Amino acid sequence: MSAGHPREVTTKRAIPPMCRVCDLPMAPTGKGTGSPSERTGGADDHYVCANLECLEFGIFHTRPPVVDRPDEPRGVVVTAAGPQMRTLMHDVVRPGFQSFAERWGYDLHTVDLESDGARADAAAQRAKWAKVDLLRQALREFPLALWLDADILLTRTDDDISTHLHPDHFQALALENVPAEHRVNPNTGVWLMRSCPSAFEFLDAVEAAGPQPGPWADQGAVLAALSWNRGDENYHWAGPGRGNQFQASTSWLPVGWNQPYLEGRTANTCYNGSADSYIGRPTVPRPFAVHFMGMTTAARLQHMTAMASALADSVGTSRAPATPSPAAS
């Protein structure tokens, strides 16, 4: 895979637990079964949030499961972009992906595509379809492959996404719920897959379906492979449909793992849907991944850069900035 960024190999180490409220490192107390000198030894060491601004300040916690960083990665995070999104991917998006990968023991592969087109033209659809091949390549090399679109910002790293993949399932996706278009459908902007026969069989089914007519190339093929009801030609009224064995073996991610960006959407900044179609979509106050879907490149540059700057400014404060509420859009 032509990632261009070599993997950093680390030795095994325990990752200090983070406060679930403020996402800052907690301080060991030396209590519990762990050695006070080691501070990380026992299964029930006690930690306390030392952040004065946090609601959990002074509250003791039993240490959550510790993740060891093995010599070999647990999986790989994959993303890709063509010329129009390439600078944004490397300079704005990649740092958050890297932080997540390092925290949870993943490689990171960022792939430069030859072209990416504009809006939903043919070149843009080909670029979207590249994720199917890149995921297949990743699954040949790693136990887990997490695809993240290059128009996504990771705003938090305190949740290991693999915990949302059922042990008997081969993939996990988030559902896109659009009340204005009466549709519910998987969104492939965040796509976690486990390397197993079912994953490769599903990718075979996606390729057999081929790029679908309408605004979605890869995502439309994923719906077809899941026997999802696509609704009309614009996916209005899309719903689960009759389903199949692939759908039954798919886990569904929390909405905060693929939350649409809502603020500042106008007729001039949106495509593949109106600005009004983003009204009423389910959101959470502190998502893990914010998706700048359906926006022009210029709008993405403006809004993603602003949010990345706000996230950088929030380092060392009590919490990451909350995303705008639906009312703000």
Image (tube, rainbow, N blue to C red):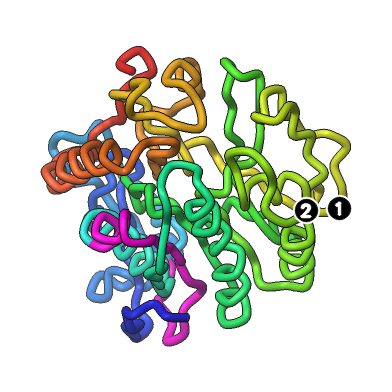
Tell me residue 280's x, y (percent).
Answer: 49, 16
Query: Which residue, given by chain and number where applicable, does mark 2 sit on?
Result: 249
Q: Secondary structure at mark 1?
A: helix
* Residue drawn 50% across the image and 20% down it: 277
Q: Is residue 300 above or below residue 139?
A: above
Look at the picture and state if 159 lies above or below 141.
above
Q: Position of residue 297 (x, y in %)?
A: 31, 43
Q: Is residue 115 visible?
A: yes
**Could you tell me which secondary element the residue under label 2 belongs to?**
loop
Q: Amino acid at mark 2?
A: Ser
Q: How many marks?
A: 2
Measured in 3D between alpha carbons, the distance from the residue under mark 1 to the one under mark 2, in whole angstroms, is: 6 Å
Task: Mark 1: give few (<14), some (14-19) or many (20+) Cα within 10 Å.
Answer: few
From the viewer's perspective, is 138 left or right of 88?
Answer: right
Question: In the rendered structure, does residue 217 fall within the stretch colored magenta?
Answer: no
Q: Is residue 30 visible?
A: no
Nearest the eye: 71 or 187: 187
Relative to the observer, which residue lies in front, 150 or 255? 150
Q: Which residue is mark 1?
A: 245
Where residue 46 appears, x then y in whole percent? 33, 55
- Crowd rating for badge 2 (residues with CA inside 10 Å; few <14, some 14–19, many 20+): some
88 is within the stretch colored magenta: yes
- Residue 253 vs residue 73: left or right? right
In the image, is 141 to the left or to the right of 45? right
- Marks 1,2: beta carbons within 8 A: yes
User: Depth check: 248 or 212 in front?
Assistant: 212
- As shown in the figure, which amino acid type bears the numbered disc 1? Gln
> Residues in magenta?
67-90
Q: Residue at the location (47% across, 81% down)?
A: 1
